[in-house]
Image (spheres, helix red, strand yellow):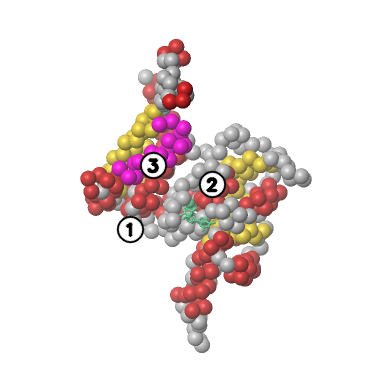
Amino acid sequence: MRSGFVSILGRPNAGKSTLVNALVGEKVAIVTSKPQTTRNRIHGVLEVVAKGKLPAAQIVFVDTPGVHKPGTHLDRQMMQEVHAALEDRDAVMLVVDASREVRLEEEAAAAPLAEGEVAAEKPEHRKLDWRSEDEFVFGLVEKLDCPVFLVINKIDLVRREELLPLIERLRGRRGFAGVFPISARKRDGLDALVDELVAVLPVGERYFPKDQFTDQPERFLVAELIRERILMETGEEVPYASAVVVETFEEPAPVPVSKAKKPRMLKGGIPAPAFVPVTHIGAVIYCERDGQKAILIGRAGEKLKTIGAAARREIEGLLGTRVYLELRVIVEPDWRERKGFVDGLDWRKQLEELGNKQGRDEEK
Ligand SMILES: Nc1nc2c(ncn2[C@@H]2O[C@H](COP(=O)(O)OP(=O)(O)OP(=O)(O)O)[C@@H](O)[C@H]2O)c(=O)[nH]1
Ligand SMILES: [Mg+2]
């Protein structure tokens, strides 16, 4: 069989997380219309069955934060996650948003260069010029020694006559191992992409057990689902200044068989479930200012209630139990600038901490 890591790289909002979820067939990473949604690298695992000449494979996709110019310490940490994802990988997919590229082309066409004007100095043209905004992303893959695939996403948003010249223009930018126009949202073009990836992966054994689809433990997926709702329900700075930490996660206690009562009958003779498991979750939403806290809580607590209710439904879908969710909002002034705090948000580090704590508790 084949196995390997495929890192996914691109600007914010290109649709990287949508693509990982579509490929894996599970919600591994949160998706919103706001840029810089993803903050950590996230592994999503796909099992591919053998097909004709193609062998069976396990592909570990690595979703990454969108590449952007760092402003805060959090941004720098996000960029480190991108670099970490580029270190151990067997192939890379560079994802671009076709609709954005077409829009930039239109803007440039609407402001033609006058005689003597240089593209790099005119805003409408500079964005189009890959030596500026997008060039940095391309620079990151330039020196990689693995196959790099160009994935042109969101083709459902552009017309065919716009797409073909775009493919030609982007294809010429670098020696890509392949160019794939796709729609992650409509799951269009993904089979050809997977076939191509399997073909370039090395022979090897699975990195993850067959039925595991991500490396993130449930409590961190839960924190992400809460953050996804915050991003959807709030605007301005609030989404960017918010972070979520799950502090308590109490799984339902198993009910001994002898204690299970005779099932109560519902209408139509259907037995009512004897025991409805409930997971108790307590989470903290951090923000940076009192004003942001006021927005997150809302008038008479309405906003927090909306965020909690929607997140709870998603979490119940993930865990397959009922969920009791308690949310608190805490102001941590300028946390995005504080290395210690930002490091503490990293779920890999939190997991280490939890492991250490458990070890200490067991020693006692
Ligand atoms: N129409 C259309 N929209 C898409 C497609 N793929 C993603 N989107 C939308 O684009 C937006 C951004 O998607 P994400 O998957 O969060 O993008 P991302 O690249 O992970 O963004 P960051 O995490 O911020 O770097 C969401 O609103 C998606 O629904 C697509 O193929 N077609
Ligand atoms: Mg993302």
Looking at the figure, which quarter contains the C terminus?
top left
Q: Amino acid at mark 2?
A: Asn
- Residue 109 is situated, as x and y percent measured from the top left of the image, at 52, 78
Q: What is the distance, in whole Å, between disc 2 and disc 1 at their CAs?
A: 27 Å
Q: Are marks 1 and 3 in contact (CB under 8 Å)?
A: no
Q: What is the distance, in whole Å, between disc 3 and disc 2 at their CAs?
A: 18 Å
Q: Which residue is mark 1?
A: 236
Q: Which residue is mark 2?
A: 21
Q: Amino acid at mark 1?
A: Glu
Report if the beta carbon of the residue with label 3 is closer than 8 angstroms to ligand 1. Answer: no
Q: Earlier in the sequence, mark 1 or mark 3?
A: 1
The residue drawn where x is 24% and y is 52% is 291
The residue drawn where x is 37% and y is 37% is 246
Identify which residue, 38 or 25, lies in the foreground.
Answer: 25
The residue drawn where x is 51% and y is 88% is 115
| Neighbours of disc 3 within 10 Å: few (<14), some (14-19), many (20+) | many
Q: Earlier in the sequence, mark 2 or mark 1?
A: 2
Looking at the figure, which quarter contains the N terminus?
top right
Q: Earlier in the sequence, mark 3 or mark 2?
A: 2
The segment highlighted magenta reads 305-322
- Mark number, residue 311: 3
Report if the beta carbon of the residue with label 2 is closer than 8 angstroms to ligand 1. Answer: yes
Q: Main secondary structure of the magenta part?
A: helix
Residue 23 seen anywhere in this rendered image of the structure: yes
Q: Is residue 137 left or right of residue 344?
A: right
- Residue 199 is situated, as x and y percent measured from the top left of the image, at 71, 49
